[in-house]
Amino acid sequence: MTTAEPLNGLRHRNIKAHQSDELSSHAESHNNVQEDTLRQWQKHAQKVKVKVLEQVQDQLSDILDKALTESVQAFTHIQPTTNGKTTKNSLSRSQKMCDGKVFMGRVSLLDELFEISHIRTIYHMFIAVLLIFCLSTLAVDYIDQGRLVLEFDLLFFAFGKLGTVTWAWVVMFVYTLLVPYYTLVFWGSLYHSFSSKLGLSLGTGLILSAVQTCVLGLFPIYVVVDNQLPPASRFIVILEQIRFLMKSYSFIRETVPVIMKDTPKEGESPRFPSFSSYLYFLFCPTLIYRESYPRNTHIRWKYVGVTLGMILGCLFYGYFILVRLCVPVFRPETNQPFSKRTMVLAVFHSILPGIMLLLLCFFAFLHCWLNLFGELLRFADRMFYKDWWNSTSFANYYRTWNVVVHDWLYYYGYRDFLWLSKGKFRAAAMLSVFIVSAVVHEYALAMGFGFFYPVMFCLFAVFGVVFNFTMNDKRQSPVFNIIMWACLFLGQGVQVCLYCQEWYAQIHCPRRENSFWELVTPRSWSCSYQR
């Protein structure tokens, strides 16, 4: 009896322990299932949360933009300001201009996005690529020459003859500052008392147009061609020529209707825009004239220094892209006989440097350069571009890529065309804006490179128009964003490839005569050179 009792107790304990192990394992497996189910629900809830937040953010952004625009328009009717000070004389002018573009204090989109660590990491990745370019150049120079050296001979060549560029810019600036303004004052002081208002307006307009054609039209071309300026210096002169023309036109276009409608009382002289407001307009980063703009309270000098550093970084970035990715492929020493295969390979090889140059131009000019002047002048409206990279249609891409130029084309091209046609021919108005933009782009590239090769014009005026009408705002699927980027990649590859080939063809096979067909026929079509 005494021996059996312990054995039974031991067997009973073993059974209980086995049952408890089974219960604990069952409970553990049940807990694991619950945890898996909970994780799946958390993931599903997170996806739903992201979708809901995106929809709410889009709708809320549209509502806030509309509310801000309406509030600013209402405010400009009540209390216009100049640099934070109320000006009674500008009340009527602001009221008449408020139907155009409304300026408000806004920061650039990239400045907002750089506050997010994930987006800032992408920016850091581009800096790392720049460092890799520097290291690769140093390594190649050390292998080839046995020493570490960074030579920027191409950069110095591109920006040569800066003295000529400076005095040409001074001439254009002084003319744009004085002639349009005092011509407006002269015309406005006589308009309401002159018997033939139409004759006065036509005569003054024709004389001003003739002078504009000579000084801002022919003079920059003469400077570029006669002095044989290098490419970057050419672009500085030509782009400043276009900027001064657009600024002076906006000033005349915005002020003339106001002066015509504001008949001064007897014994009073007409009111004109202040000279200081026009001078400020010539430097501030917008092409739409207003007598007052929203202004910041102070200048952030640290922001100015960082932005200057980014502009210099973009300059060297572009240099390394050309030296490491373009020159070794297209220079005459590495030229191969022309064939369809070599052309296709050259185009696809040019896609990477092409898209990198596109992003650099966007970041350096539309973000850094315009924000630099905006900060120095305390210009508060920094919406120089929108989220063009999210576009699912080329129509939206053209509107958001360069808001500064788009506003000028919209208000003075598209909208004025509709006003003249009494709201008809919207397609013709859009097409005319495309043609004007394509011609100006092609003119800038032809004068900058020193040869005529209408690659940009064909891509812009032909394919751009087709894509604008076919890939319109109704296309909202992410697939169309992929298509847009694929078209940008391919277009940039074609431009870089053809322009680089033509550049070296112009050097190796110079023109033998200055006939019209020699000037407009690309040399790369007939030039063949071997090593």
Image: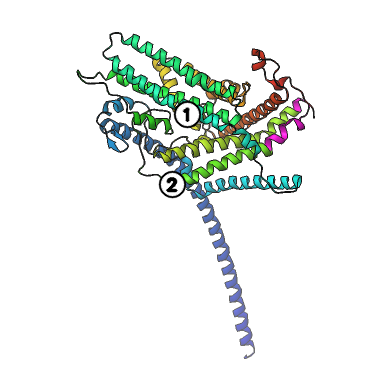
Quadrant into which the N terminus falls: bottom right
- Magenta range is 325-341
Residue in the image at 38% along x and 36% along y: 65
Q: Which residue is mark 2?
A: 301
Relative vertical location of residue 389 with respect to residue 15 in this rendering, above or below: above
Residue in the image at 72% along x and 22% along y: 509
Relative vertical location of residue 521 with respect to residue 330 in this rendering, above or below: above
Q: Earlier in the sequence, mark 2 or mark 1?
A: 1
For the residues labelled 2 and 1, the Cα–Cα distance comes to 27 Å
Tell me the kind of residue under disc 2: Trp
Relative vertical location of residue 478 with respect to residue 428 in this rendering, above or below: below
Q: Is residue 50 visible?
A: no
The stretch drawn in magenta includes residue 297: no
Residue 254 position in % (x across, y down): 36, 23
Residue in the image at 48% along x and 32% along y: 400
SS state under label 1: helix
Magenta-colored segment: predominant secondary structure: helix
Tell me the kind of residue under disc 1: Val
Q: Nearer the viewer, residue 210 or 335?
A: 210
Q: Which residue is mark 1?
A: 170
Residue extending furthest toward the left: 266
- Nearest-to-viewer mark from 2 and 1: 1
Mark 2 residue crowding within 10 angstroms, few (<14) / some (14–19) / many (20+): few
Quadrant into which the C terminus falls: top right
Q: Nearer the viewer, residue 92 or 506?
A: 506
